[in-house]
Image: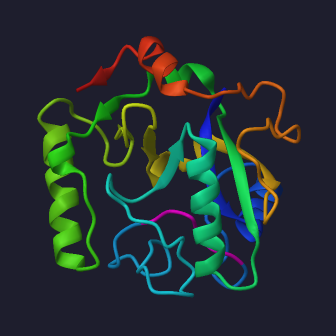
């Protein structure tokens, strides 16, 4: 089932295609697009230029960020390639492998007060601990198994898929380097990707476990 879009680079896109799942590429051959805390070296981003990170903030925590806005995904794809010289921009349509599992997975809207990131490892950890504490007050879950949602505006949305459940998702990617027009439907995407996408409007009606 289609979930949303993610901006990345061609190396990561190719790796995901080969593996058939959103998995961590070998550090010597590709980047891992999961922005996150600096304490987990080679897995989460330290946000230094050319360190194999995506260059993106992680305001909901560490993991794969998905949006319903193609223009935003294109922006992140171009930012990603700048942080990873020798790559080109790519946009991926992200799909849940199991539709029922996706719809039934616990989902939490993270309050604006708890959204944020920092280059300071200690501050970043404190922010994520606060988010985890907020979630733990509402449900008892295995760490990293919930979906975190954080609207960016009244029209643009994002969600976070954390590393423990990332293999439950697949990516269909297209090369968009220097040629993407977000106003035209990319015909290379699978036919079941809806355009225009405002998936989170539908998403909240489908979700019976969203907590705000």
Pick the residue in front: 79 or 139: 79
- Whole-percent x and y of residue 190? 83, 33
Q: Is residue 54 inside the magenta stretch?
A: no
Q: Which residues are magenta?
A: 30-35
Between 208 and 199, the one lying in front of the other is 199
Picture coordinates of residue 137, whole percent (x, y):
11, 35
Residue 113 against residue 120 in the figure, above or below: above
Q: Residue at (31%, 42%) from the top-left corner? A: 142
Q: How many marks?
A: 0
Q: Position of residue 122 (x, y in %)?
A: 17, 76
Above or below: residue 6 compared with residue 202: below
Residue at 54%, 70% (x, y): give it: 54
Give the residue displayed 37% in from the left and 61% down from the top: 58
Colour scheme in use: rainbow
The quarter of the image holding the N terminus is top right
Left or right side of 29 for 75: left
Vertical arrangement, residue 66 with respect to residue 36, above or below: above
- Extreme residue toward the right, this view: 188
Name the quadrant containing residue 151: top left
Which of the 4 image quarters holds residue 135? Answer: top left
* Image quarter (top left, top right, bottom left or bottom right) of the C terminus: top left
Q: Main secondary structure of the magenta part?
A: loop
Q: Is residue 181 left or right of residue 47?
A: right
Position of 185 with respect to 111 (left or right) is right
Q: Residue at x 79, y 38 (%)?
A: 184
């Amino acid at each position: 089932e289609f979930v949303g879009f993610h901006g990345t680079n061609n190396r990561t896109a190719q790796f995901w295609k080969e593996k058939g799942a959103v998995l961590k590429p070998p550090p010597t051959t590709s980047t891992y697009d999961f922005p996150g805390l600096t304490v987990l070296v080679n897995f989460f981003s330290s946000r230094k230029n050319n360190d194999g990170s995506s260059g993106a903030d992680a305001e909901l925590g560490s993991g794969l960020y998905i949006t319903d806005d193609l223009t935003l995904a294109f922006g992140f794809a171009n930012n990603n390639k700048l942080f990873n010289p020798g790559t080109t921009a790519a946009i991926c349509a992200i799909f849940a492998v199991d539709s029922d599992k996706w719809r039934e997975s616990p989902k939490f809207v993270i309050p604006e007060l708890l959204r944020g990131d920092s280059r300071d490892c200690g501050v970043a950890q404190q922010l994520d601990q606060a988010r985890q504490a907020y979630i733990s007050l509402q449900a008892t879950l295995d760490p990293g198994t919930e979906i975190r949602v954080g609207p960016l505006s009244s029209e643009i949305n994002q969600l976070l898929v954390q590393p423990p459940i990332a293999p439950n998702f697949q990516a269909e990617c297209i090369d968009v380097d220097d040629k993407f027009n977000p106003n035209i439907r990319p015909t290379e995407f699978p036919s079941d990707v809806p355009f225009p996408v405002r998936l989170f409007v539908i998403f909240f009606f489908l979700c019976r476990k969203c907590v705000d």
